[in-house]
Image: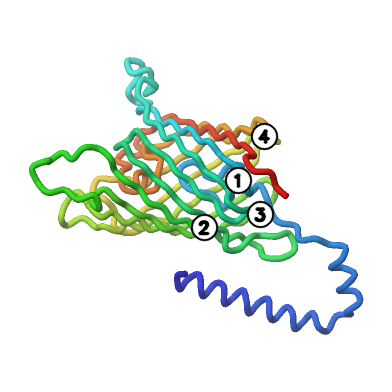
Amino acid sequence: MTKITQILLTTFSLIVAGSSLYAQDEDLLKLVKDSSNKQKQWSTGAFKSTRVINGQSMELLGKGVLDVRILHRFGLLSNGADNFFGLDEASMRMGFDYGLTDNLTIGVGRSTLNKELDAFGKFRLLRQSDDGLPFSLVWVSGITVHTMKWADTSRKNYFSSRVGYYHEIIIGRKFSNAFSLQLSPIMVHRNLVTNADDENNTFALGIGARLKLSKRTAFVVDYHPILAGREPGTKDPLSVGFDIETGGHVFQLHFSNSTGMNEKAFLTGTTDDFWKGDIRFGFNLSRVFQIRKRK
C-alpha cells in the first residue's frame, strides 16, 4: 500500500471516528430505528463502462460478470478518400475482464499493435455513497509484454526487456445523474527504452468525464497529459466520443490521436497531434455476461 493511500485511509478513519463521537449525543433509540429502516445507497453508473475510452474508469464489474471487449482504432482521417479516411487500416485489441468480487476486477487482452499482451488487476478501496463518502477511490496495476521478434537478433536479448508495468489510482465522483468526473495519476515503467538517455518511467494525469445526453447516450472525454518522462516525439493522448447503451452492450464511438489500447501503448507511443488534425476514428464494443450467479 502506497504512502498516499495510507494517508487517505488514515484521514477517512479519523473522519469516521469523529462522526461516531458526535453521534453518541443523538437519541440512541432513533439511531436504532433509522439503521433498521435504511440501507446504504451506493452510487452507481458514474460511467457506463469500465473504461472511459482508453483509460480505466472508476467503475468495476459485478461479481461473476464477464466483459468481452473488442476495440478498434483506424487510420488517420487526414489520409483522405484513397485510404477511405483511415478505415482501410485497423489496429485491434480483444480483452476479457472478469469480476472476482464487486470490488475486484481482473482482465487480460491482446493487441495487434506490437503484438502486445496485457493483464491488470483493479481494486476499489473506497466507494461513493449517497449518504456517506462523496467519491470513489480505485487502484489499478497492470503488466504488458511486447511479443514481436527482435529487430536485432545478433545481440543478446532478454525477456525482461519486453515487459512494462503501470500503476494508477483513480479518484472519481458522480456529481449528478448527468455528470461524472475522475482524475487518475498514473505511472508507466518500461524495462527497455528506445535510447539510452530516455526515461524508463513516464508519469501522466488521466482526466475522464461523462455528460449524459439521453437515457442511453452520453458524451465522454478521455485526456492524459504527460507530466514527466515523456518519450521523445510523443504527444498527449486525447479522445472524445459517445457511449451508446443497448441492453447488454455498450458501444463507444470516438475520435482519438492514439493507436495504442493499453496504458503503456497510448501513454508512451502516441505520436500524432490531435490539435493538428491527426485524428483517428475508432470504437469500443463491450458485451457483458453473468457467468456466475449471485447468491
* SS type, badge 3: loop
In this view of the protein, which residue sits in the foreground, 153 or 205?
A: 153
- Is label 3 or label 2 in front? 2
Picture residue at 60% right of the left edge, 47% below the top:
61
Please tell me which of labels 1 and 2 falls first in the chain.
Answer: 1
Picture residue at 51% right of the left edge, 36% below the top:
69
Query: What amino acid is labelled 4 in the image?
Result: Arg
Say which residue label 1 marks: 47
Query: What amino acid is labelled 3 in the image?
Result: Phe
In percent of width and height, residue 120 lies at 45, 50
Query: What amino acid is labelled 2 in the image?
Result: Ile
The residue carrying pointer 3 sits among few (fewer than 14), some (14 to 19) or many (20 or more) residues within 10 Å by Cα, namely few
Q: How far apart are marks 1 and 3 (CA)?
A: 12 Å
- In this rendering, the answer to whether 13 lies above or below 79 is below
Please tell me which of labels 4 and 3 falls first in the chain.
Answer: 3
Say which residue label 4 marks: 216
Picture residue at 57% right of the left edge, 51% below the top:
100
Picture residue at 58% right of the left edge, 34% below the top:
287
* SS type, badge 2: strand
Please tell me which of labels 3 and 2 falls first in the chain.
Answer: 2
- Is label 1 or label 3 in front? 1
Query: What amino acid is labelled 1 in the image?
Result: Phe
In this view of the protein, which residue sits in the foreground, 29 or 182?
A: 29
* SS type, badge 4: loop
Say which residue label 3 marks: 175
Residue 170 numbered tag: 2
Hey, which residue is sitting farthest top in the picture? Answer: 82
Q: How far apart are marks 4 and 2 (CA)?
A: 25 Å
Q: Quadrant of residue 251?
A: top right
